[in-house]
Image (cartoon, coloured by chain):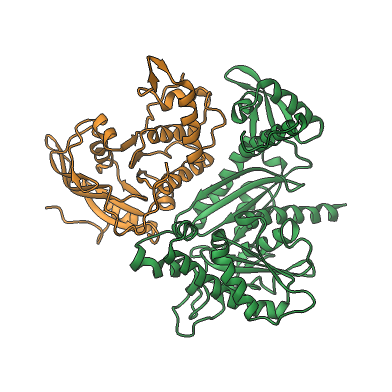
Chain colours: A orange, B green
């Protein structure tokens, strides 16, 4: 899972680049002329109020929605992400809030759900177990047994399984929609550490959250959406929470003029 | 299991025992079934070894339930209670629980935002400690005390930061009191570098020596001084604050309000700024990883930092004449890339002692030195109280 060390982050192009993304649902403007970029080895926080367009943007990246207008580039080449499976082929993996895991299956079965390794009609249980262990080790995930059924795991461990699942297809970009919502502090600590690991593995990460502390703790860059428009971009290393809140709420001096 | 050489039955048993103890340590508590899966050993082997370990007092077992079935929970045995060691860094939080034998029972790290607000961080510490106690199957009543390390000079009796502006938003707050009130347990606040010195002198590389110095180079630089086997804090806790020794009279203004402090040259902000043009925006972790991988620019920045720290430390060494200097903090993870220039500068600028040459070594406890020190500090403070009560 390790990628070669790139010598400079400024010379590597963005893994995902979106320009002028607009999405309308009838009279509702969910996204208007949104620009969004993610580089390799970068965690980009996506924040905003309810109905600011965060999830719509995530769904467009994941191939679940098609933009009304706009340009999407993967590694500099224009693409159409027509469906979730197309997104998967392009190296984009998404973990939605509901995780979409099977409670009655064990960790290994969940990781390979729908893409089980088989040859000559038989499942490669051993190979899948081996890959599961290797992915969990790459993430240093705190999961004692890969044969534990999901319903016995804690919220943090389930989130770890959902994130590990994305790594099976060797993605370049991972989108995490509210991964720390409804987790205890110890579990949040595990998930935030996992996000750092994804970054260290060389992946681009989009981290959507309402929790500004979690966002500030892990993100290299933070993009604010407000009423479907870009409303500020902040460097994670120096941002103050007050500025983020001002941008989210559109305080005077932090709003963009609506055209 | 390929890392163990083939050998006798007893060697195999020993290796399996080590595997089981390591797994219990990693997760805090595991059922025997989970233990079998985590280690790859058979259920029978796990059961036999756990029984042996229970008899020798290494682990404890207690009945529990997993999805309705009876199971046996295995945790590390602990004697006479637990203490918590906590270190608040500029971008992360380390929390560990340990017993009176300094055995670590559970451990968590958590990334934190830049300039993290005091209330949020103390809230997270309190919740994390309670969560971790729960994982060990216990609660606050068994917690003897908490040691808290901060990357700033601390006045030990009040637990307040004694210099303004070093940690934004943390000034003038009784950190110890706030946390002690919340958890109902004694809280002992101390400077993180002092805790590193305490840990290295108690459990680490400085153990054989009475006079030692611990240097931490992380987001900021600091040092802890042990004199005659005791921590030397100074009158109000500012002893060893090497990060605020002036090294460049024409340099940048420091957080403390003065000009050209060591932190403005070797602090994370300074290191990252000097790589901005050539490497773009990096984090301190990126710089360390790349310096280890041999990226020339990152290695140069780390080596220069080693020289700058070495020069200031040489002044401290000339003053207090320690037998050993141990080096911790994130930059020490770069190994000799950081350590060699530091050692060289230090040797060049201190009087060569013919009788007992000064040693310069990486901290034996590595990046855990400070959080282990927080644990040691909590345990030692509790010991004193128990003796007084008698």
Is residue B247 toward the left or the right of residue B346 in the image?
left
Which of the 4 image quarters holds residue A97? Answer: top left
Q: Is residue B152 visible?
A: no
Q: Is residue B345 visible?
A: yes
Vertical side of A228 occupied by B351: above or below: below
Residue A85 in picture, x, y percent from top left: 26, 29
- Foreground: A151 or B133? A151
Which residue is found at the position 31% from the left and 47% from the top? A46
Is residue A103 toward the left or the right of residue B234 in the image?
left
Is residue B11 toward the left or the right of residue A106 in the image?
right
Is residue A162 toward the left or the right of residue B176 in the image?
left
Image quadrant containing the N terminus of chain A? top left
Which residue is found at the position 50% from the left and 80% from the top? B258
Which residue is found at the position 46% from the left and 69% from the top? B301
Vertical side of A249 occupied by A171: above or below: above
Which residue is outermost to the bottom? B249
Residue B160 in picture, x, y percent from top left: 61, 65
Residue A170 in picture, x, y percent from top left: 36, 37
Which residue is outermost to the top? A121
- Foreground: B77 or A138? A138
């Amino acid at each position: 899972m390790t990628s070669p060390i790139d010598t400079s982050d400024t010379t590597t192009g963005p893994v995902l680049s979106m320009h002028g993304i607009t999405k309308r649902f009838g009279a509702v403007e969910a996204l208007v002329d949104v620009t969004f970029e993610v580089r390799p080895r970068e965690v980009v926080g996506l924040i905003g109020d309810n109905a600011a367009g965060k999830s719509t943007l995530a769904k467009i990246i994941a191939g679940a929605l098609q933009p009304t207008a706009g340009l999407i580039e993967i590694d500099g080449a224009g693409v159409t992400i027509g469906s979730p499976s197309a997104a998967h082929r392009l190296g984009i993996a998404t973990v939605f809030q509901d995780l979409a895991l099977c409670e009655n299956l064990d960790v290994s079965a969940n990781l390979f759900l729908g893409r089980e390794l088989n040859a000559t009609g038989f499942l490669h249980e051993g190979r899948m177990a081996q890959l599961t262990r290797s992915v969990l080790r790459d993430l240093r995930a705190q999961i004692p047994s890969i044969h534990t059924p999901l319903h016995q795991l804690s919220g943090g461990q389930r989130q770890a399984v959902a994130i590990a699942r994305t790594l099976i297809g060797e993605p370049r970009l991972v989108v995490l929609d509210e991964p720390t919502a409804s987790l205890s502090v110890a579990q949040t600590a595990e998930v935030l550490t996992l996000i750092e690991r994804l970054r260290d593995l060389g992946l681009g990460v989009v981290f959507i959250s309402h929790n500004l502390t979690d966002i500030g703790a892990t993100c290299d860059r933070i993009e604010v959406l407000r009423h479907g428009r870009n409303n500020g971009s902040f460097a994670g290393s120096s941002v103050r929470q007050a500025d983020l809140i001002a941008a989210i709420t559109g305080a005077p001096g932090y709003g963009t003029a609506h055209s | 299991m390929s890392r163990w050489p083939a050998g006798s039955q007893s060697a195999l048993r020993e290796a399996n025992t080590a595997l089981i103890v390591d797994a219990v340590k990693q997760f805090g508590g595991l059922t025997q079934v989970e233990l079998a899966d985590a280690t790859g050993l058979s259920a029978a082997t796990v059961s036999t070894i756990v029984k042996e370990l229970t008899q020798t007092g290494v682990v404890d077992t207690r009945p529990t339930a997993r999805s309705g079935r009876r199971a046996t929970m295995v945790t590390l045995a602990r004697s006479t209670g637990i203490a918590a060691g906590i270190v608040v860094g500029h971008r992360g939080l380390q929390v560990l629980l340990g017993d009176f034998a300094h055995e670590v029972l559970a451990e968590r790290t958590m990334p934190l935002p830049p300039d993290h607000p005091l209330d949020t961080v103390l809230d997270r510490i309190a919740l994390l400690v309670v969560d971790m106690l729960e994982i060990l199957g216990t609660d606050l009543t068994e917690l003897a005390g908490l040691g808290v390390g901060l990357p700033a000079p601390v006045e030990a009796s009040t637990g307040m930061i004694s210099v303004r502006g070093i940690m934004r938003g943390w000034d003038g707050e009784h950190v110890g009191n706030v946390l002690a009130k919340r958890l109902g347990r004694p809280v002992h606040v101390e400077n993180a570098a002092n805790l590193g010195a305490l840990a290295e002198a108690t459990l680490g590389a400085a153990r054989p020596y009475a006079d030692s110095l611990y240097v931490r180079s992380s987001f900021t630089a600091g040092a802890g001084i042990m004199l005659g086997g005791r921590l030397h804090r100074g009158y109000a806790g500012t002893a060893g604050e090497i990060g605020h020794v002036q090294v460049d009279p024409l340099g940048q203004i420091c957080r403390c309000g003065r000009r050209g402090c060591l932190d403005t040259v070797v602090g994370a902000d300074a290191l990252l700024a000097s790589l901005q043009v050539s490497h773009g925006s990096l984090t301190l972790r990126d710089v360390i990883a790349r310096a280890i991988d041999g990226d020339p620019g990152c290695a140069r920045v780390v080596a220069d930092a080693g020289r700058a720290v070495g020069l200031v430390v040489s002044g401290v060494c000339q003053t207090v004449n320690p037998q050993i200097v141990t080096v911790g903090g994130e930059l020490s993870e770069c190994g000799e890339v950081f350590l060699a220039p530091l050692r060289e500068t230090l040797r060049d600028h201190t009087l060569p002692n013919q009788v007992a040459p000064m040693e310069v070594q990486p901290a034996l406890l590595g990046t855990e030195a400070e959080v282990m020190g927080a644990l040691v500090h909590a345990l030692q403070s509790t010991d004193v109280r128990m003796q007084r009560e008698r």
